[in-house]
Amino acid sequence: MTETTEIHPPLDDAATRAGAWMDQFDSAIVAYSGGVDSALVLALAHGRLAEGVLACIGVSPSYPERELEAAVDLAKRLGARYRLVRTDEHLDPRYAANPVNRCYFCKSNLYGHLRRVADEENISVIFDGTNASDLGEIRPGYRAAQERGVRSPLAELGLEKNQVRALARQLGLPIWNKPAMPCLASRVPHGVAVVPALLSKIASAETVLFQLGFTQFRVRHHGDVARIELPAEEFARAIECRETLVCGIRAAGYRFVSLDLGGFKSGSLSQPIVSA
């Protein structure tokens, strides 16, 4: 974890402001993935609007099965209503081409499905999990949300990532310190076609790491090569279980398995190359 737990303003004030903010609505859909941001939005909304809240989980080839199971388990633990919403962004050639704004097409598809659910259920608003720290980043998916009238409670309340984690911890959410886990398509270099078979291959490779007890990881796809990103402090353990790791990832369909000595870096495929 790189985020600190030092926050401002105080948590009690943040929780009170969040509750008051929720009072402007009588019902809401939460675009819920099981990550700490959307889980906190769900907990806050459910605590205020109760049965007026519906957690919608977008299910697609880019969403790992283990993440789906964990998201459902947490929704049940919170006592929140939930629905699995099958999306089909992979059928959109603009998404499948994997441009730099791929997330725009993915989120446009998701929110289109959620808007239909909202209309069917007479639900007044859709929430997402964008927090204030996200606003300083280039996020095509956030633009898609804004265009479709999706509200971002955490961002609108000014809650940054460290505050989100601290408030989630105070509320007893077991995933308060869960590492970010973006969709599987983020493991594929831009310009390489994103297809279900490839996403399944990456999911199988990452499951090997998950089953070995690693919590923060990526398997970046480079043709026949699976490039593993782990925090530097996990390198020694990866070497200890090297044989199991290599066999498992080869079984997933990769010919070569590499450990990136640069370590784990979220969004590394989008980072510019810096020469020495």
Image (spheres, grey):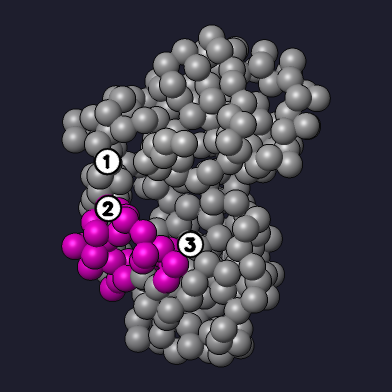
- Kindly identify the residue that appears in the image at 48 percent across and 62 percent down: 38
Residue lying furthest top in this view? 255
- Alpha-carbon neighbours of circle 2 within 10 Å: few (<14), some, or many (≥20)? some
Horizontal and vertical percent position of residue 85 = 37, 47
Between marks 2 and 1, how big is the CA–CA gap? 9 Å
Between marks 2 and 3, how big is the CA–CA gap? 18 Å
Asked if residue 135 lies in the magenta stretch, the reply is yes
Label 2 secondary element: helix
Mark 2 touches mark 3? (CB < 8 Å) = no
Q: Which residue is mark 1?
A: 100
- Alpha-carbon neighbours of circle 3 within 10 Å: few (<14), some, or many (≥20)? many
- Kindly identify the residue that appears in the image at 78 percent across and 32 percent down: 237
Mark 2 touches mark 1? (CB < 8 Å) = yes
Q: Which residue is mark 3?
A: 38
**Disc 2 residue type?**
Pro
Decide: is 225 above or below 88. above
Looking at the rendered image, the disc whose residue lies closer to the viewer, 2 or 3, is 2
**Disc 1 residue type?**
Val
* Residue stretch rendered in magenta on the structure: 124-151
Label 1 secondary element: loop
| Disc number for residue 140 | 2
- Kindly identify the residue that appears in the image at 39 percent across and 47 percent down: 58
Which sits in the foreground, 221 or 169?
221
Between marks 1 and 3, how big is the CA–CA gap? 24 Å
